[in-house]
Image (spheres, rainbow, N blue to C red):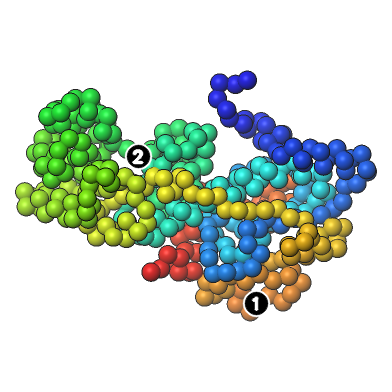
Amino acid sequence: MTDFDIVTPDAIAEGRATDAYFERTEETLEAAGRNPHVVTEVTADQFSGGGYELLAGVKDAAHLLRGLPVDVDAIPEGRLFDGGPVMRIAGNYLDFAQYETALLGFLSHASGVATAALDVRTAAPDSLVLSFGARHVHPSIAAMVERSALVAGLDGFSHVAAGEILGREASGTMPHALVICFGPGEQESAWRAFDETVAPEVPRVALCDTYSDEVDEVLRAAQAMDRLDSVRLDTTSSRRGDFRHILREVRWALDSEGYEDVEIFASGGLVPADLRALRDVADGFGVGGYVSNADPVDFALDIVEVEGVAGAKRGKLGGVKEVYRTREGGHEVRRRDDPEPEDGEALLEPLVRDGELVDGVDLTLDAAVSRAEADAALCGYGEE
């Protein structure tokens, strides 16, 4: 027994983070003296359907598979995919069978979060957008959530420990709890105490909807603080009515009182449609559950070739495949032996060769962010 229900990194690396039937399979194949050379592919949809998703989790998958006597090709993290394989593994089956569960988990969950974050990013491309959803997930995966959000282009995140893992500083100013600890009518005391205490480089953002009308608290905060960068409105949906109208009232009041430089930040249960509706009246957003609670991409790993002979289970496409990005942003799936499309760019690239990471493979977060931005523009992701 452990204090926290967390599967350890050692268990993942040793292949124990697996489904029990893979252990039974290993026992059976070893007893039968069978260990064929296979090619497997990780896919969500077999054919292109025009519904792009953003690939994430490749860094973790690469570190899971390095050291195994296998060859791996993968679409680089941060690229969009629509049908066909995102990863291909070739090797003797027993050398990697027990890693399937963890591998799919790495790719499925991160890609789902990254795709949701890309929905958010494209809904408000010119706004500051932060990931606020770590409180909705098990703390052991917070770094995955925040990294996937960054891959999609979000500007920051809130989770401190995730920041330590990712080498990025977490964002955040004050919760309602801080104001409530000072009590009703003492909002100014809370805002001033914050201003006098936190480091100078921390933005001065006052939360302005704890006890009274948003316009009232916003103006009081602006008058109480010598330096106020922005105000945050996080009013629960059951109390805020027409949020867009409230934000417009707040902007009007700030401008009327000479606080044109104070920005407005909105949060609280927001989804992409909200950002599209509010992006002209708010300067930034915090998005939580829509990103952190995203459904994982339903990846599967299937054998498509055994000892050089194409084959697959019923309902799957046998034979090794390639995927291409066309110059117009399209996505094509073809048999590996078929001619390449004239304007096609092969998306699968060498990742691991005989257990070693391929020289020049860039698994950094910055590289993934750049790929995602370029691919989203090329493919017209999120265009209205």
Q: Is residue 147 left or right of residue 90?
A: left
Q: Quadrant of the N terminus?
A: top right
Q: Nearer the viewer, residue 191 or 20?
A: 20
Kind of residue indicated by mark 2: Ser
Tell me if residue 354 can be seen. Answer: no
In the rendered image, residue 315, in percent from the top left (x then y), is placed at 73, 63
Task: Please name whichever residue, 201 or 140, is drawn nearer the observer in this view of the structure.
Answer: 140
- Is residue 148 rendered to the left or right of residue 101? left
Query: Residue 52 at x, y = what percent?
Result: 53, 63
The residue beneath circle 2 is: 171
Residue sitting at x 10%, y 35%: 224
Residue 131, given in percent of the width and then of the height, sits at: 39, 45
Residue 272's place in the image compared with 177, above or below, is: below
Q: Is residue 155 left or right of residue 303?
A: left
N-terminal label among 1 and 2: 2
Which residue in the protein does label 1 denote?
A: 341
Helix, strand, or loop for circle 2?
loop
Q: Name the residue rendered at 93%, 43% in the picture.
A: 32
Secondary element at image label 1: loop
Q: Give the Cα distance between marks 1 and 2.
A: 45 Å
* Amino acid at pointer 1: Pro
